[in-house]
Image: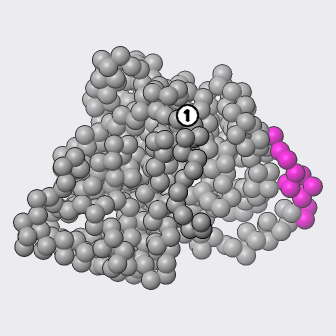
Amino acid sequence: MTGTTQDDYTDRYARRVRGMTTSEIRALFAVASRPEVVSLAGGSPYIAALPLDAVGEMLGDLAAQQGATSLQYGIGQGTIELRERICEVMSLSGITNASPDDVVVTVGGQQALDLIARLFLDPGDVVLAEGPTYVGALGVFQAAQAQVRHVAMDAEGLIPAALEEAIEATARAGRRAKFLYTIPTFQNPAGVTLSEERREQVLDICERAGLLVVEDDPYGMLSFEGDAPLPLRARRQTGVFYCSTFSKTFAPGLRVGWVLTPHAVREKLVMMSEANVLCPSAFAQGAVTQYLSTMPWQEQIKVYREIYRERRDALLSALEDLMPAGTTWTRPTGGLFVWATLPDGLDSKAMMPRAIAARVAYVPGTGFYADGTGRGNMRLNFSFSSPERLREGVRRLSGVMEQDLAMRAVFGGAGLQPGHQRRRGPAAADAPGPDLA
């Protein structure tokens, strides 16, 4: 029978499949991509800002002049040419002691996280991660059958005392956390940045506890207000895995990322990658290498910064002018996202169908927590839509929220359903609220 949703393979799946759930963001793509919908949902860079004619000519030259190698199989670790360019890129962020031998090229930043999870996580292991955190990382840890314990954040990023408590609570439960997963700079989804003082504190805590650190840094070059703080990997070499990608600074469609790994682990990560994808795309690597070697890519980063700063300002202005009383939000100094906290009684997940009907999309906060909380929050993206579209999206979203608030006032809504806990914050830098739990 065609069109049936019957799954005849349920009793044959591996155990790791049983807990897998659909990404909140992937489920939104079908409707958020409609032209009549103002999407505040995805995390797409504004690719139209690239000099696409020049990029197209560069790709044509790559195929014509180097096709015999760039269209062939490659090596599992990635080409030496690209790994050398990656070390040059990292040096601009303060990581000046990296060797190309310790760089493993990956299929986007997502594969870097997957390789680390495959290398270190057994079923039932504990991963510490900020709450909220990147939805793609949660999917990786879920697939590895690991348990994520969230660590609270505020306007200055991850709270060191909360990290110590999470480590101790895990130990009291007779377990040991394998690593801390953190996005310390322009965090996804919260938009907050770990302060200078806390960076040293977090590294000291992890070092004392023997806890590895997985630093995810896709947005560090997209600073709007001076240079971003030095990455954790620029401060400590031992025990820190540094992951990044060209998806936000060049082109996500090429799917080229990397992980800078402690030397002792490099060979095992390469073997994991070979088992996973055999080798990353030689053509995609060649394209990134050519881009970094022949085009003014640092000037292009400045273009992105200006565009995203303008759009961040437009979104913040619209939120200030149009959001209902009781709504708070973060004020990012870089990256792509704002994290909003709704007035008491509103549920971002329950509200989503009404928002789509009003032709606006966002990501409910539940997608960024392993335990499904976060119904009092939403993530808003400002990188893709024009300032005018952003304001229109906020206008539509505000209307939906006002309607929900009016309905609750009339009918005396009891708030969230039992078991659907709220997560507050991280609060705006100028108006701190309750910490995330």
Q: Magenta segment: does it hold 203?
A: no
| Residue density around tag 1, few if under 14, some if 14–19, many if 20 or more, within 10 Å | many
Q: Looking at numbered disc 1 in the image, what kind of residue is underneath it?
A: Ala
Identify the residue shown where x is 47% and y is 54%.
Answer: 22
Using residue 396 as the reference point, say whether residue 64 is left or right of it: right
Q: Quadrant of residue 147?
A: top left
Question: Is 268 drawn above or below residue 174 in the view shown?
Answer: below
Residue range corresponding to the magenta coloring: 64-75
Residue at the spot 83% in from the left edge and 45% down from the top edge: 74
Residue 101 at x, y percent in the picture: 73, 32
Quarter holding the C terminus is: top left
Residue extending furthest front?
1
Determine the image quadrant of residue 329: bottom left
How far across and down, in percent of the image, does residue 139 sit?
49, 45
Residue at the image point whose x is 53% and y is 50% from the top: 218
Q: Which residue is mark 1?
A: 117
